[in-house]
Image (tube, rainbow, N blue to C red):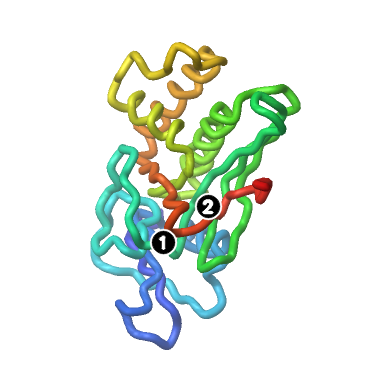
Amino acid sequence: MQKRKTYQIVKQNEQYPANRVGYFANVTWDEVQVLRMKLGLVNGYQINSIIGTGEGKLLNPTIEHATAPQMTVAENTDKRPIMSLSVDAWTSGNPGMGGCRLVGEYKGQVKELSTYTSKAPHSNNLFELVAVLIALRWASKEENRMGSEIYSDSKTVLAWITKAMEGNKKILGPKVNERELIENTLLDIKLLMEQTKVKLIKWNTELWGEIPADFNRKK
């Protein structure tokens, strides 16, 4: 049985730590190979074993130590992430038919990892919530042992999730439609966040531009 270790992602022919991309923590060597293919970290990159195991999955390059991510909705920082998982949603009308997706980005290269569409009319907030659920389900799979941080640009949805994680029973305002669907989705998200220890972060559109998962449907 392969041992689980922490591996650093390094550009070839350069010295650590200036060229560090990030870490894969608490993974086997075979899992590392799958992850580097998913993220396009093959040509020009090498994966080195380092001391420590940690409990994280994919650690952001700005994190200095391989520590377990906290189960929370975090505040964003001023520095745009080099590597990220992000979600976004769209609707044709509100409510209306729509969809959502999860994408991975590394240095401007974006790859769609999961997507969902529905012809049934729903609110944009519900689709944004479903996007987070899809991302958590994707990150919880063994072969996707990554994603300690997921970005969303929806203040409303992140506020709902924060209240759900805190055990607040008064999450939705009186004018919110689709209450049962939203409450059930929030419950699923809470359970997955407790299992995966994923951190949700507000995407700073003002400083970083549109979120990588954006559908480019804005006029």
Q: Cβ–Cβ below 8 Å for labels 1 and 2?
A: no
- Residue sitting at x 30%, y 47%: 69
Q: Is residue 53 left or right of residue 43?
A: left
- Residue sitting at x 60%, y 49%: 214
Q: Is residue 76 left or right of residue 138?
A: left
Image coordinates for residue 55, horizontal then vertical, percent:
29, 49
- Residue sitting at x 39%, y 42%: 200
- Secondary structure beneath dot 2 equals loop
Above/below status of 63 relative to 46? above
- Secondary structure beneath dot 1 equals loop
Classify residue 40 by image quadrant. bottom right
Q: Which residue is mark 1?
A: 80
Residue at the far right in the pictured view? 119
How crowded pointer 1 is (Cα within 10 Å; few <14, some 14-19, many 20+) is rated as: some
Image coordinates for residue 147, horizontal then vertical, percent:
44, 50
- Residue sitting at x 38%, y 65%: 22
Distance, label 1 to label 2, CA atoms, is: 10 Å
Residue at the far front in the pictured view? 219
Image coordinates for residue 140, horizontal then vertical, percent:
46, 40
> Mark 1 or mark 2, which has the lower sequence index?
1
Q: Which residue type carries mark 2?
A: Ile
How crowded pointer 2 is (Cα within 10 Å; few <14, some 14-19, many 20+) is rated as: many
Q: Which residue is mark 2?
A: 211
Q: How many marks?
A: 2
Image coordinates for residue 5, horizontal then vertical, percent:
33, 60
Front residue of this view, candidates 197 and 206: 206
Q: Is residue 114 left or right of residue 52?
A: right
Front residue of this view, candidates 93 and 159: 93
Classify residue 191 by image quadrant. top left
Q: Which residue type carries mark 1?
A: Arg
